Amino acid sequence: MDKQSGYTWKLGMFVTVGSLLFIMAIYFIGKQKNLFGSTFHITSQFKTVSGLEVGNNVRFSGINIGTVEEIRLINDSSVVVSMVIKDDVREFIKTDARASIGSDGLMGDKVLTISPGVKSTKVVENNGAIASINGIEMQDLMKSVKKSVDNAAVITDELAIFSHSMNNGNGALARLVRDDKMANSVSKTLSNLESGTKGFSQNMEAAKSNFLFKGYYKKKEKEKEKKEKELKEKKEEEQKKAEKAKEEKAKQDKENAEKAEKAKEEAEKAKK
């Protein structure tokens, strides 16, 4: 009897622990997949989803706010991605928000990121759509880095040839000044150096910004706006200067005309 009671107690504990683990698993999976709580749906259209899968996270300002619910191919160049989002963040997603696809770290899963809009104040509707932007893929970044490295290799070879010519030729420095072929080689080397350095700097700047490159593009956009603003201010300043010069010239002409008229009147009085 005692032995049977022991088996019953162990079985009860096993069932209880198993049930708790099952409930916890359901809870965490449901929380991750937004099965609990109020949600809404939005879509975005891409040319390619770059390995994005159903269930991948959707992020807004670095915070997980939902998941990818469905990926649907509508033609040979368009893919529609449906997202399920927590309803409590809906007020922050405007109609001019943008969706992009990136990586969660260097080798991580794909992530769909929603970038906030800057102009619209209208909140996106349930089952609404937002525009998409094409993020820079890691493959494209590595191609660009490889190109920069190849340029660096060419530069190294050309500098080695140039150094050898300088050290072993008679009057190498004088020949450099007179020899058009060598001068062109030096010019080409410097051009490659400038191109390689510029490309490498841009790649590193983009990589630092994170793999979604949101910060990189935002910085470029701010620089463009700043340049346009400075150009506009300069143009307005030049226009003001031109108007001021025109007014001063008109004033001077008026004064000269008055002086001439006065001199004419004095001359007529003198004749009388």
Image (cartoon, rainbow, N blue to C red):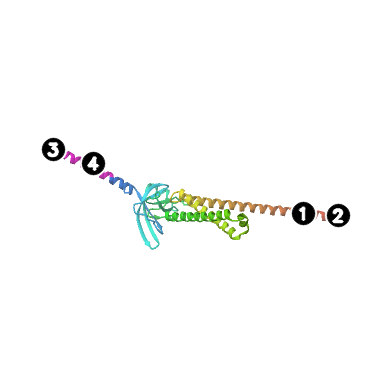
For the residue labelled by badge 1, is the local secondary structure a helix, a strand or a loop?
helix
* Residue at left offset 16%, top offset 40%: 8
For the residue labelled by badge 3, is the local secondary structure a helix, a strand or a loop?
helix
Task: Look at discs 1 and 2 and give the one toward the viewer.
Answer: 1
For the residue labelled by badge 4, is the local secondary structure a helix, a strand or a loop?
helix
The numbered mark at residue 17 is: 4
Marks 1 and 3, how far apart in space? Answer: 127 Å
Q: Name the residue beneath numbered marker 1.
A: 256
Three-letter residue code for mark 4: Val
Instruction: Answer few, some or many: residues within 10 Å of disc 4's Cα (few below 14, many 20 plus, some between 14 and 19).
Output: few
Extent of the magenta region = 1-24
The numbered mark at residue 33 is: none
User: Residue at the bottom extreme?
Assistant: 76
User: Residue at the left extreme?
Assistant: 1
Name the residue nearer the viewer: 134 or 169: 169
Instruction: Answer few, some or many: residues within 10 Å of disc 3's Cα (few below 14, many 20 plus, some between 14 and 19).
Output: few
Give residue 25's position: percent from left, percent from top.
Answer: 28, 45
For the residue labelled by badge 2, is the local secondary structure a helix, a strand or a loop?
helix
Q: Name the residue beneath numbered marker 2.
A: 269
Task: Look at discs 2 and 3 and give the one toward the viewer.
Answer: 3
